[in-house]
Image (tube, rainbow, N blue to C red):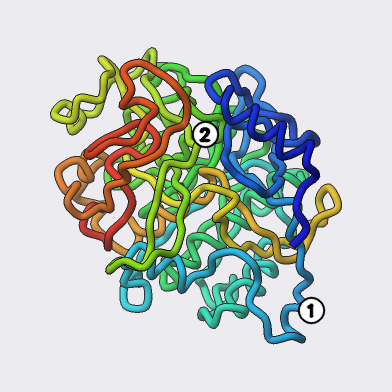
Amino acid sequence: MRLPPVRTLVVSLILAAASSLSVPASAATPSTAPTTNTHPFRHVCGSAAPGTASCHALARTDVMQSAAKVKAAAATPSGFGPTDLQSAYKLPSSTAGSGQAVAIVDAYDDPTAESDLAVYRSQYGLSACTTANGCFRKVNQTGGTKYPRTNGGWAEEISLDLDMVSAVCPNCKILLVEATSPTFTNLGAAENEAAALGANVISNSYGGSDTSDASYGSYYNHPGVAITVSSGDSGYGVQYPASSHYVTAVGGTSLMTAGTTRGWTETVWSGAGSGCSSYNTALSGQSTFNTGCSKRAVADVSAVADPNTGVAVYDSTSYQGYSGWLVFGGTSVAAPLVGGVYGLAGNTSSIDNNYPYAHSGSLFDVTSGSNGSCSPSQLCTARTGWDGPTGLGTPNGTGAF
């Protein structure tokens, strides 16, 4: 494996120490998000301007495998695959999820979304999910088939999201709704369309500056639909719509195999977003967990997000010179993964986003690591029970969903 130059390692250590000061990097520059990773990675989307969101996918730059070579060698792509994720989170993926529809909302068009998804599912022995068999559907933000313009970074995000839902809930149907652009107004229109088309779960792997539900909350207020949102990849600090009162905010962990009964261990991923919203009302379920916030606290739950312990994704977009089998991280991994777990549980019509707080015993508590320095410390440092970067913990089956 090719390691980054010494200078890159030194810079990474300096940036990790300065994590509380980090801001999202542009898509074309090396990451400056706080991280303990030893592998280089890139932000696939640029920074978010006011009123817009940026996707939260991070792609490693030291891994790229063609589908042909992987197939010819009968090899397994780098990064965690479905069996790993199902094992780590004790999921009934082979028996649950039928009749559930998980929607993915992203900006712009991924013209090869369906064919790339087919490569992923075939590689791991998952049943086909196609337009023809009724499992997959792609629409624009008004439900039509005149798709937005293509954007390579968001196309990679779309591939990541589709693959993670497939990995966790292969029996779920998948609806991809593509917004015209990453403004909150257009993404919100896509959110409404996903709900109108009957999605049981809607996953959102993007965010922008913390803002008020008074401005955009109506887009995410869909009782009976579980809405997951990634918490961000810049360490301590809050983003919207993760800070919305109406969603499940999903933080991030580093996931590793271990010689334990579970077989896995997790710590805080140093890039996971967390903190207190300045605007939005706290969830009622948070009242007994001493979050340190008078308003909405982020996150609620979490899953793997560290690019260094990342997941395998197939994307043929050829963006910034990368295509084929790649390894991704970011809380963009965690949001659709948890969305898939909601699909496996099949309870969304009768629960809301307070449900995990009443069922925290069905989560793996993450008790070590941090994403920065803050006060009170639970907003950025892991502890027993709720903490900012990982919320209540990661899925241990479907009981918390």
At x 38%, y 45%, the residue is 302
Secondary structure at badge 2 equals loop
Q: Position of residue 209 (x, y in %)?
A: 53, 20
Q: Quadrant of the N terminus?
A: bottom right
Residue 331 image point, x, y percent: 51, 43
Under mark 1, the amino acid is Lys
Instruction: Indicate the quadrant where residue 92 lies.
Output: bottom left
Q: Relative to the observer, which residue lies in front, 75 or 140?
A: 75
Residue 272 visible in image: yes
- Of 112 and 365, which appears nearest the observer? 365
Question: Which of the 4 image quadrants contains residue 42?
Answer: top right
Residue at image position (17%, 51%) is 361
Against 222, residue 98 (above or below) is below
- Total marks placed: 2
Dot 1: what SS?
helix
**Residue in view at x 67 percent, y 38 percent:** 180
Find residue 215 and report its horizontal and vertical position in percent: 45, 18
Image vertical order of residue 250 relative to residue 326, above or below: above
Mark earlier in primary sequence (2, 1): 1
Which amino acid, by three-letter code, is at mark 2?
Answer: Gly
- Residue 221 shows in this picture: no
Q: Nearer the viewer, residue 401 or 391?
A: 391
Label for residue 69?
1
142 in relation to 263, above or below: above
- Within 10 Å of disc 1 (Cα), the crowding (few <14, some 14-19, many 20+) is few
User: Label 2, on which residue?
Assistant: 232
In the image, what residue occupies the spot 54% across and 31% down? Answer: 207
Real-space Cα separation, disc 2 to disc 1, in angstroms: 34 Å
Left/right of residue 326 with respect to residue 246 in the rendered view:
right
Q: Residue furthest right?
A: 321
